[in-house]
Image (tube, rainbow, N blue to C red):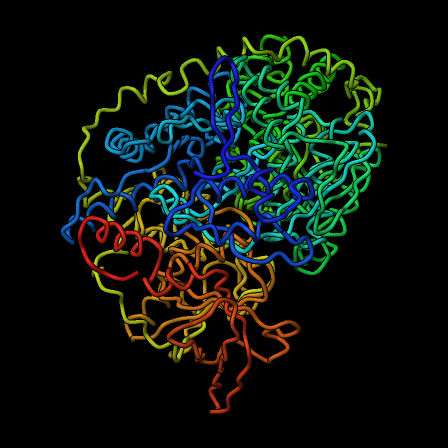
């Protein structure tokens, strides 16, 4: 291998790709390259083979900030999965084994070629909260609901090489990843040498980006792309622009990393960084703790970037020590990063596509909402902002109600008392999600605020459902050791489990009297959570206004009991006739830092992670047998053999004509993967609910869409099934309904799709800006394909969803600049004809003709969002997974073309 250099660390000799040598070959100056580009350059150089050739290197070595050229073939070193997206990925791998055997191949050809770790963190639901028994109850229900899924994962753990599972009750994937799984710099035997190289990864959760806080390049992908990476396929993406975010000064007292993350999210969304890398630097960079950086990196999907990278520096090394990593590893990380110019140099700034300066001294306490994480609201304005949203037009900042809504109230009829619930009251307060529970400063701030609140006699109203769901067991360890946990519990914030819970929509039911009061008056109520997502319909079906906030502010709003107060001027409550204000209970930075220094250290981390894979006795007791192929159970409503490979042949398929496409849905801007592929509860009267009822599943056992992603029958019926989806084909409607043009009926989207397919018709989706923003849900693309949708025509796509569509053989088209469905006069009643050539080209213009019912037609140009030559190969194979199967058969002696 060329460009290598030797280094001796800890009395051992290692080899590595020398980036200075590599850059010199192309007459390039390494120091002008952003750190992320350096990592990509090293990866491409080290993975040279028949497909990843030296021809790709000049585009990275001579990277152009203004107009990057070329395509990056990227092979991550690891893949991480969470169980919601991991189960369908493993289902696909099992089905691929069946397919390859049916075509005469060897099942063992389908095996992970790089390390894969699946963390079970998305399945625990907050069925019980506010009591000491909550965690035990929720965990028991989790295992009852998910026994089939967990048995399947246990089979996979035993039957696939390079595949390990972190069981339930351990932590959230991203927090476990940053606190334990990543070594930052990896080593591997290649020939006779032991090579050192940067850890890189892809994950089936969009918040995989959190690992960038540790100086590790990684991002979220759909399960389909992750499966390809697992099987040794590179992903191809255009050489990215890199936006430099320059921090200056220090954050003021009373602010948190959450406030900074919300500010960055607001700024970068306006800068339109979708598909771009973000890299942090500047004199203020060193002022941020690694936990603060992790919070920023975690929110990259919310600001739309592929990643938010924090280069390795002394703080990285300090964090590795704090989290109990071995001293030898820390020495290795420092030696390699410095030798290969991957260690942050404050004296030498790289060139960036654009530099955005953020003054840390100007950060102020804030929330985001009521429907999107980029809609930041400064703390004093939260109440008035909510009031404005009540009557604002329906949209990200409006509910479209009348002024009468402000005066609404409902009675909560408890067995022993009655409470009054009004518009804007808070019915759910959750300390949850990887974003903030990985940050000891904000978690201990919440504990100290709770302590101060309890000592002043403050309580939380009974109608507020409170919960604490940390991202790892280390959080409860330091909260208990510091003596702060009892104060949180006194306010109702009992441990409910280790998982995403409320942030992923597993918030569980509200107390029956509260739910009935809201339902009776159709009351507009609120939630506050320390999460990263608050999209419509995600948090709880009865709560329409949802706000993101730091953990201490979650506690404060729980005490206030309403979102309509100005917590900077109005008292949280009156105790014994005296007002108690937020400023009276907010802990000082010095106080919080003293707790961090005392209670957060390596011994606690080592203890928390000593038995990462085998500590859960319920998991250990699951009995399975390893086998080459999976024994599918026909009666299972959780795990089903997917239909993608039923008609697979060794030869490339003939692509059908894209003629007479019917519009299945016409959608507006900011349609998220939560709208397309909901993860929350399954409605009794929904298409998926009826499917389960017909198979004898009781409503109590429906579980969530996220937990049932291993069964395509349910997920097809849930696609476009979000209760807040607004399909413009049925004006004024919400939910999974559409206009079925052949009869003029209003049908469920699933039923209309089935009728179109039975008639031999294919479908198209029309959409606005940022289509597919949010979570990296493969089912948003899988369901789209199974509903017979051949094309999605949008104003713009979010990165991951565009990629997922292509990998499922669905064609993404974009209107050309300045054109929209509205400007072209498209109302969705038209039939569409797409003039896609047999040999399409990357990014080419494609003519689309819309034929109206009166016989007139409109032809207009669109841009084909095949962004790399690999996308064309995927389309020709009708998806990346059929392509991989054909490649594996070819490698074992079959002859075919991909």
Position in image of residue 126 (x %, y %): 48, 30
| Residue ID at (39%, 73%) | 839
In the rendered view of the protein, which quadrant contains the C terminus? bottom left
In the rendered view of the protein, which quadrant contains the N terminus? top left
Q: In this view, does 372 lie above or below 319?
A: below
| Residue ID at (22%, 45%) | 97
Q: Residue 477 lies in what quarter of the image?
A: top right
Position in image of residue 60 (x %, y %): 58, 49
Does any portion of residue 516 appear in the rendered image? no
Locate residue 836 relative to residue 325 in the image: left or right.
left
Report the front residue among 311 and 612.
Answer: 311
Position in image of residue 292 (x %, y %): 67, 29
Q: Is residue 585 above or below residue 433?
A: above
Position in image of residue 623 (x %, y %): 22, 24
| Residue ID at (27%, 53%) | 887
Report the front residue among 16 and 577.
Answer: 16
Does any portion of residue 11 appear in the rendered image? yes
Q: Number of numbered discs present?
A: 0
Report the front residue among 850 and 399.
Answer: 850
Locate residue 107 relative to residue 260 in the image: left or right.
left
Locate residue 283 relative to residue 92 in the image: left or right.
right
Q: Residue 492 lies in what quarter of the image?
A: top right
Q: Residue 700 lies in what quarter of the image?
A: top left
């Amino acid at each position: 291998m060329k460009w290598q250099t030797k280094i001796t660390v800890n009395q051992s000799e290692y080899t590595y790709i020398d980036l200075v040598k590599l850059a010199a070959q192309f007459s390039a100056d390494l120091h002008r390259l952003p750190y992320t580009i350096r990592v990509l350059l090293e990866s491409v150089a080290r993975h040279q083979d028949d497909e990843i050739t030296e021809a790709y290197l000049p585009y990275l070595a001579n990277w152009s900030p203004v107009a990057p050229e070329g395509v990056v073939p990227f092979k991550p070193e690891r893949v991480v999965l969470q169980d919601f997206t991991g189960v369908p990925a493993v289902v696909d791998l099992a089905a691929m084994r069946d397919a390859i055997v049916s075509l005469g191949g060897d099942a063992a050809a389908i095996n992970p070629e790089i390390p894969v770790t699946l963390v079970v963190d998305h399945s625990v639901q907050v069925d019980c909260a506010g009591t000491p028994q909550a965690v035990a109850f929720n965990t028991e229900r989790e295992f009852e609901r998910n026994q089939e899924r967990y048995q399947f994962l246990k089979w996979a753990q035993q039957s696939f090489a390079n595949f390990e599972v972190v069981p339930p009750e351990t932590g959230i994937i991203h927090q476990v990843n940053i606190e334990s799984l990543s070594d930052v710099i990896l080593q591997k035997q290649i020939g006779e040498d032991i090579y050192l190289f940067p850890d890189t990864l892809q994950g089936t959760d969009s918040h995989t980006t959190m690992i960038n806080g540790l100086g590790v390049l990684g991002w979220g992908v759909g399960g389909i792309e992750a499966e390809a990476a697992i099987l040794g396929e590179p992903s191809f993406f255009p050489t990215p622009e890199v936006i430099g975010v320059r921090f200056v000064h220090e954050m003021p007292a009373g602010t948190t990393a959450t406030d900074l993350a919300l500010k960055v999210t607001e700024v970068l969304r306006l800068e339109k960084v979708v598909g771009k890398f973000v890299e942090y630097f500047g004199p203020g960079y060193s002022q941020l703790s690694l936990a603060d950086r992790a919070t920023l990196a975690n929110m990259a999907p919310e600001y739309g970037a592929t990643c938010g990278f924090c280069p390795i520096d002394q703080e990285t090394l300090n964090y590795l020590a704090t989290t109990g990593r071995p001293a030898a590893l820390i020495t290795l990380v420092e030696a390699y990063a410095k030798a290969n110019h991957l260690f942050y140099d404050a004296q030498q700034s790289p060139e960036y596509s654009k530099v955005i300066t953020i003054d840390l001294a100007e950060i102020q306490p804030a929330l985001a909402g009521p429907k999107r994480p980029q809609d930041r609201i400064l703390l004093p304005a939260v109440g008035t902002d909510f009031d404005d949203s009540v009557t604002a037009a329906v949209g990200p900042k409006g509910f479209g109600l009348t002024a009468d809504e402000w005066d609404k109230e409902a009675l909560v009829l408890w067995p022993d008392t009655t409470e009054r619930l009004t518009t804007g009251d808070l019915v759910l307060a959750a300390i949850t999600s990887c974003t903030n529970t990985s940050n000891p400063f904000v978690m201990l701030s919440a504990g100290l605020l709770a302590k101060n609140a309890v000592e002043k006699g403050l309580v939380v109203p009974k109608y507020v459902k409170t919960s604490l769901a940390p991202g790892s067991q280390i959080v409860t360890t330091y909260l208990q050791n510091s003596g702060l946990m009892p104060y949180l519990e006194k306010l109702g914030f009992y441990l409910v489990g280790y998982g995403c819970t409320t942030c992923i929509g597993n918030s569980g039911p509200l107390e029956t009297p509260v739910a009935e009061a809201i339902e009776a008056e159709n009351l507009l109520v609120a939630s506050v959570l320390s999460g990263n997502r608050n999209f419509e319909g995600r948090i709880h079906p009865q709560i329409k206004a949802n706000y993101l906030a730091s953990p201490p502010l979650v506690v404060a709003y729980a005490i206030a009991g309403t979102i309509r107060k100005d917590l900077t001027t109005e008292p949280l409550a009156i105790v014994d006739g005296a007002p108690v204000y937020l400023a009276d209970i907010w802990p000082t930075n010095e106080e919080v830092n003293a707790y961090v220094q005392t209670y957060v250290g390596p011994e606690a981390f080592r203890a928390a992670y000593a038995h990462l894979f085998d500590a859960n006795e319920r998991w250990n007791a699951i009995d399975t047998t390893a086998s080459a192929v999976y024994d599918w159970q026909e009666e299972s409503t959780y795990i089903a053999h997917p239909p993608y490979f039923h008609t697979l042949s060794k030869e490339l398929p003939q692509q059908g004509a894209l003629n007479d496409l019917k519009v299945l849905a016409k959608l507006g801007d900011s349609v998220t993967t939560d709208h397309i592929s909901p993860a929350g509860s399954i409605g009794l009267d929904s298409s998926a609910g009826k499917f389960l009822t017909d198979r004898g599943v009781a409503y109590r056992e429906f579980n969530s869409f996220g937990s049932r992603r291993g069964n395509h029958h349910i997920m097809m019926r849930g696609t476009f099934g979000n209760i807040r989806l607004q399909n413009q084909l049925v004006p004024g409607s919400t939910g999974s309904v559409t206009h079925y043009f052949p009869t003029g009926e209003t049908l469920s989207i699933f039923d209309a799709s089935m009728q179109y397919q039975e008639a031999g018709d294919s479908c198209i989706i029309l959409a606005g800006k940022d289509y597919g923003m949010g979570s990296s849900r493969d089912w948003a693309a899988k369901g789209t394909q199974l509903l017979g949708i051949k094309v999605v025509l949008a104003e713009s796509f979010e990165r991951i969803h565009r990629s997922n569509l292509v990998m499922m053989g669905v064609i993404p088209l974009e209107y050309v600049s300045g054109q929209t469905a509205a400007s072209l006069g498209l109302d969705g009643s038209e039939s569409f004809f797409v003039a896609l050539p047999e040999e399409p080209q990357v990014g080419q213009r494609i003519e689309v003709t819309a034929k109206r019912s009166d016989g007139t037609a409109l032809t207009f140009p669109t841009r084909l969002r095949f962004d790399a030559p690999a996308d064309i190969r995927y389309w020709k194979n009708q998806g990346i997974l059929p392509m991989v199967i054909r490649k594996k058969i070819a490698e074992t002696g079959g002859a075919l073309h991909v």
